[in-house]
Image (cartoon, rainbow, N blue to C red):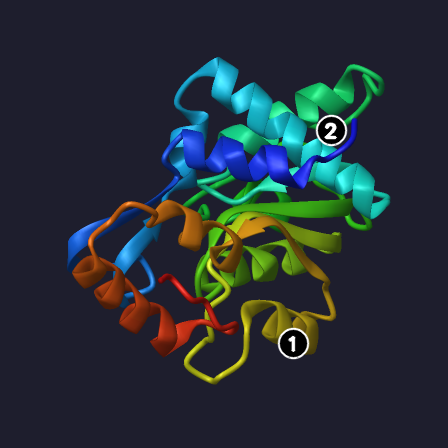
Amino acid sequence: MAFNKKEYDRFILDNKVVGVKQEPFKLKSGRLSYWYANCRVLSDTYGLLSKTAQFVVGRIDELGLEFDYIYGTPDGATKLGIMANIILGKDNPSLKMVVGRKQPKEYGEPRDRFFVGPVEKGDRVIVLEDVTTTGGSVIEHLNYLKEAGVNIVAIVSLFNRLEKRDDGMSVAEYIKKEFSIPYYWLSDGPRILPLAVKGMSSELKAKVQESVNKYSTEKIKLS
């Protein structure tokens, strides 16, 4: 199942995953921005969820990663992680089905406190995330997985805003430094945002550009 980058980018645009607002708004990370990336819309229907999961499986296959199952971070990537495992399970009926708890149980073993499913020490796991901004959500779940003793093979994000953290590092740099885990993504802000703002007013583009310049790890020219 090959991954087609251009086809995925068009899929992102066609389903209005990336958009712009007239006034700044607060992201989950707490930052103010004029533009957003909402990958949860890709889980709204079976068709969208299935297509997105196929892109994910194709990207993972392209990377040549060896793993036992995919773990979707709650709640944004939970459904997608399940669907990706269902696709993979067609050729591997013994593939585990593991779901993360958004709020850990107060007591119990790590496999029961943090997860629903047969998590075991030594499992090779790919962590799936929906949108990457500062990495706060995925880092929280990396710690849960580490406590459970699994081997995190890689993190794969549907969309990476490619923004600097408050410490000046990109999320991929931070994860590599602190966890020694590679970080991959299917699409990102520098690729999609210039296409998403086409046809918008110069004034709005200027506002988005100012927002982008403040945090982006790469230069993005919108006009």
Q: Residue at x 43, y 17 (%)?
A: 45
Q: Residue at x 43, y 44 (%)?
A: 102
Q: Is residue 209 above or below residue 72?
A: below
Residue at mark 2: 96
Q: Which mark is residue 7?
A: none
Relative to residue 203, is residue 39 drawn left or right? right
Q: Which mark is residue 178?
A: 1
User: Which of these two is toward me, 69 or 161?
Assistant: 161
Relative to residue 111, is residue 1 drawn left or right? right
Relative to residue 150, is residue 223 drawn left or right? left
User: Which of these two is toward me, 122 or 10?
Assistant: 10
Q: Are marks 1 and 2 in contact (CB under 8 Å)?
A: no
Label 2 neighbour load within 10 Å: few <14, some 14-19, many 20+: some
Q: Residue at x 78, y 49 (%)?
A: 121
Q: CA distance from mark 1 to mark 2?
A: 28 Å
| Horizontal and vertical percent position of residue 141 | 54, 55
Q: Residue at x 52, y 45 (%)?
A: 73
| Horizontal and vertical percent position of residue 191 | 53, 54
Residue type, mark 1 in image: Glu
Mark nearer the viewer, 1 or 2: 1
For marks 1 and 2, the one nearer the N-term is 2
Q: Secondary structure at mark 1?
A: helix
Q: Is residue 99 visible?
A: no
* Furthest residue in direction left, as rendered: 23
| Horizontal and vertical percent position of residue 135 | 49, 63
* Furthest residue in direction bottom, as rendered: 167
